[in-house]
Amino acid sequence: MTHASAPAPLRGSIALARTGLLAALLGLSLAASLAAQTEASASDPSGTDEAYPWARATLAGMTLRQKAGQVLMPLVDGSFAPAGSDSHTRVLDAIEGAEVGGIIVTVGSPTEVAVKLNYLQGLSRLPLLVGADLEEGPGFRFDGIVRVPGAYELGGATTFPSLMAIGATGDPQYAYQAGLATGREALALGIHMPFAPVLDVNNNPDNPIINTRSFGEDPQQVAVMGSLFTRGLQESGAIATAKHFPGHGDTDTDSHLSLPVIRATRQRLDSVELVPFRRVIDEGIGAIMTAHISLPEVTGEQRMPATLSPRVIGGLLRRDLGFQGLVVTDAMNMGAVDRAFGRGEAVVRALLAGADIILMPPSPESAVNAIVAAVEGGRLPVARLDEAVTRILQAKEALGLDVRRTADIASVLYTVGIPEHRALADEIAARSLTLIKNDRVLPLRGTRQARVFSLTYRRESDLLAGRAFDRALRSTYPRLRTESVGRDTDASVYARLAREVRQYDLVVISTYVAAVSSSNQIGVAEGLVDILEGLVDAGVPHVVVSFGSPYLIRDFPDVRAFVAAWSGAAASQTAAANALFGRREFTGRLPTSVPPDYPIGHGLTVRGSGGDR
């Protein structure tokens, strides 16, 4: 049988053909003269920058209303939506009505997403700049269809373990390789801006929204890992977006719900939060996403989000750190800004502060109207709007979107979710596994006749949590009993399980607790704690495997064995099961401290019959 040769990835192709333009935008290898041109263009958007003829000509032909639409990037569902549906109508209103300049896409299978993006590109008068939250690879959003009943997996893009898992490997090359693979898959799908990496320094164990999304707690390690991830993304031809400036790691509030306040001085920011951002800015990152956090010691205002603060964007980011790339707001439908300032007002304030792309405005049409009114009323200088639009158009030209805006659907088959990328995810998962505690439990022993109970703690909507893990356990323990619980499980169920688990030879508890927007929760239900304490009292051998937050060990101080697997990705589930049986070594080390007992760098190994080593 003959096979068609693999087509060239989307672009990749034009972006590489325009290496000079992409370098000018991203600062990867600027010649002095080109750097000077870029600076001149930023300060004079009406501009003399000959490197971007399409951007200059396009700006000159735009109306005020079209410019207002160009800075907006609303959310689009990547899955199928028939004509006439609410989802389809909203997309048409945004692209044909508000004439938005970009979209952020979420959910769907890879081919579904690529086809839909091509369709939407055809609807738009100007090429769309497409973003997506791909912190853990394209599978983070496009992991394919799960058919119910039965939760049958139909395949999707590559999902990498969390960034904290990469931090736990201690090997920055994994960050580079994950970034490169993420960028290649994203571009094949027609996505130009993977909103990654997260450069927040997670130095607050109670942070409900960053947690394992961060590379870790040490600013220098986060900087090194973030730098290599960024390099990989941008070498692929995509635009990396570091977030959440100036640092969302030291909060205990979810900004999706309310405004976190960080009482850090500028000196503290310079020594901790800004370290990773300064490095990637110096190395030429293409975009920065702002945080919806308040910094009263910096701004002088108690309730002003960084996203809306000229002192943060115009002062700290642009003037002090010298960043001249794209500034993207965090989602503008989040409670920290939407409820506090109102939809149109928040959009105008973000532009006045220095933002270029307004992410996920609740109503694109209302946002356009607010921007137009602010310009016509003299509140928002047209030069500020032109500056933002110029940066966006130049990014599109550097990516080659003025020449070709659609993805090659065939390239999806040869780029997305390919074995090489999945093997990389498997390797990162295995290398990241961190044994935090072991009191003569691991490696697991026993016969195929052993009575083993696997209890999974997960969100009800997380259909894949525990599937790969239990499948791997059952290969050794065919009599394995499985059950799932969660935060909303009735107390009577927890009470029943607390009695039943004591009758087993071994209990394996797996938890899938990670940062989830708008939950403001990063712990477990009391019922699960009671089950664990009952196992300790009864002397039943047990192990807890955390496929998410490592800080959960604080809820289980007397646990016999605790493993940090960092991520619920299938690769992490399979790797963890193999390590429990001693088929793989535990090689990970904590990239964050887990107070009060476990410092950065802690990690045990297992030899012989188990025990701390």
Image (spheres, rainbow, N blue to C red):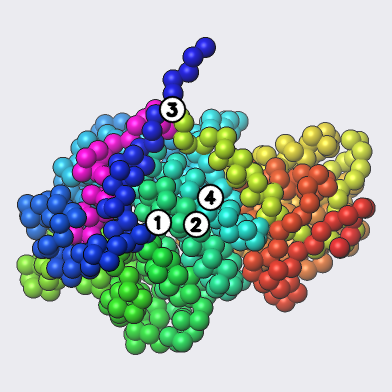
For label 3, the residue is: 6
Q: Is residue 253 visible?
A: no
Our reading of the magenta stretch's main secondary structure is helix
Q: Which residues are magenta?
A: 388-412
Report whether 212 appears left or right of 313: right
Q: Earlier in the sequence, mark 4 or mark 3?
A: 3
Dividing the picture into quadrants, the one containing residue 341 is: bottom left
Q: Residue 186 appears at what percent x and percent y?
A: 41, 44
What's the distance in space between the residues labelled 2 and 1, CA to CA?
Answer: 9 Å
- List the residue tagged with mark 4: 178
Ranked by sequence position, the earlier of labels 1 and 3 is 3
- Name the disc covering residue 240, or none: 1
Q: Amino acid at mark 3?
A: Ala
* Label 3 secondary element: loop
Q: Please rate how many residues cluster around mark 1, counting C-alpha atoms within 10 Å: few if below 14, some from 14 to 19, many from 20.
A: many
Amino acid bearing label 4? Ala
